Amino acid sequence: MKRIIISFCLLLFTVTVFAEEPDTAADRPVTTSFTEMFTRADSAFDKNDFETARYYYKVALINARRDGLKDSTAQALARFITASQKYEEPFLDSLIELKKNGRALTDAGNEALKNNDTVAALLYFGAAIKFARQNNNLNAEATILINRSVLFMRQNNIPRAIEHRREAMTILRDHGNPLMAARQLSFLGLTYPQLGMSDSARASHFAALKIFREIDNKIGEAEALGNIGSGYGVTGPPDSALKYFNEAAVIYREINQNERLADQLVNLGSVYKGIKKYTEAGERYREAANIYRTLDNLEGAAFALEGAAVAFASQREIDSAIVYYAASADNFGKKGDLRQEAQLLSEVGLLYSFQDRVDESRDYLGRVEKLCDKVGDPDFVKERLGYISAQFYEMKKPARAAEYFEKLLVIHRLNADRLNEALVLNMLGSCHFQMAEYDEAMEALNQSLAISREIDDREGEVNTLTIMGFLMQSRGENDQALESFQQALELLKQNNDIAGQQKIQKAIDELKSKM
């Protein structure tokens, strides 16, 4: 009989506690208003309908986070936790009455985990926590709170995971385990951003830092400094991010934690790159790469080398950028990451082309195509060909761009991808136009125009008609150019595109002034 009762409790708990969607639209109407959802939740809470209350509090929490309402987010989070606690109380009490033993409850939770039954494990551990509280067993309570928090994270139930970690942290802090308390604070600092609570995250990291310094735990201190730096790296200001990353790096250097030192150097490089201090960025990336190499960390070295390459390229130090891109590609190749290797060799080939070193450029881009074949992913091939052709077009190297647009065109035709076929033909026509190859340009543009009309792609049709207008104008075919512009203008009027109309009207006016 007990087994039957427990199974029924677990089933009911599974259906209700972890239900994320309303039973029906009529039962639980949802709006985007924080205030309305919070009011509904309060009303249900006052009626002791905690299951409905927790649902609406969660919706209110999502709405508050979306709208950047910090105080409302914290308020909804607290109420969601309270409603969840109230709702699960009867289930926990039933299990305690049936098992009558904290060890038995914990063992049942562990057994459920072995069977991949996370919901049952959460229920058993919840009962074990309550039992530990009733018997003032603080060590057991803190341990199980942490374990249950991990399970809530697996369920993506971030509010309950945070609740349990905070409770565990308080017990550990108040009862002589500052190291473990600081670790819980670090967890909270890394988890709060998932609810958009950056201020709470930073406060947790600073609280952890204070404890680590009090107990002279250098690794913990450096980790907390790095976490604070990462927070400022997201929210700003960058000077604060640099300050804390630097402080973390100093400690790691002092205690010979070289891999962690390299990680901080990469963080510093990223911040310097973001504020366009490329010399400083390059220095940090290079030092990090050297450290990773001594540790045989190929992946770390590869990413650091890539960062250095980007910094050099941004300063137009092309020779150095080529060296570092090639070295990064080599490391990724040794790791067997063919996609990253291909992406970085693409940069090498493009930079050689930027220097007009055509043979080297063709050699490296040829290697890219071979790697694409090895990867065997058609989407990756299209992405690489599209990227290379677009980069050549931006570099005003229409002949090289046309070469890769032709290769991309073949793939789109094989896949019967009419939209992208039209887009590539449009770009191909533009390349021929830039090279004064007017017949080839018109052929590609006419094909693009026909496909755009066939698939009713108004935007593509306007773009192609516009290019054709300028092409015919450059050949002195002003009447045909005017007709092309006017067709484009009419389409823009149909789409109510005011900005586009103004641009085409300007081209028409300028053309008429010359006729």
Image (tube, rainbow, N blue to C red):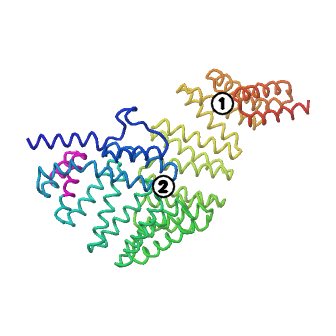
Along the line of sight, the residue nearer the viewer: 271 or 120: 120
Q: Which residue is mark 2?
A: 330
Q: Residues within 10 Å of mark 1 (few under 14, many from 20)?
A: many
Please give the name of the residue rendered at 18% of the width and 52% of the height, measured from the top-left corner: 110
Q: Is residue 375 above or below residue 195?
A: above
Magenta-colored span? 107-130
Task: Classify 191 as above or below 392.
Answer: below
Left or right of 302? Residue 52 is left
Q: Quadrant of residue 242?
A: bottom right
Quadrant where the image shows the C terminus: top right
Q: Secondary structure at mark 1?
A: helix
| Residue drawn at the location 54% of the way across and 40% of the way down | 383
Extreme residue in the top direction: 454
Query: In this view of the protein, which residue sits in the foreground, 7 or 483?
Result: 7
Residue 431 vs residue 91: left or right? right
Check the image and name the residue furthest to the left: 1
- Disc 1: which residue: 425
Q: In the rendering, at what x and y percent does residue 199 appear? A: 48, 62
Gap between marks 1 and 2 measured at Cα: 35 Å
Q: Secondary structure at mark 2?
A: helix
State the predominant SS element of the stretch in magenta.
helix
Residue 275, located in which quarter of the rendered image?
A: bottom right
What residue type is disc 1 on?
Leu
For the point 35% across and 57% down, the residue is 162
Mark 1 and mark 2 lie on one chain; the one further toward the N terminus is: 2
Amino acid carrying label 2: it is Asp
Would you say 515 lies left or right of 495 here?
right
Which residue is painted at 46% across and 75% down in the image? 250
Q: Quadrant of the N terminus?
A: top left
In the rendered image, residue 46, in percent from the top left (x then y), is placed at 34, 47
Q: Are marks 1 and 2 in contact (CB under 8 Å)?
A: no
Q: Of tags 1 and 2, which is closer to the observer?
A: 1
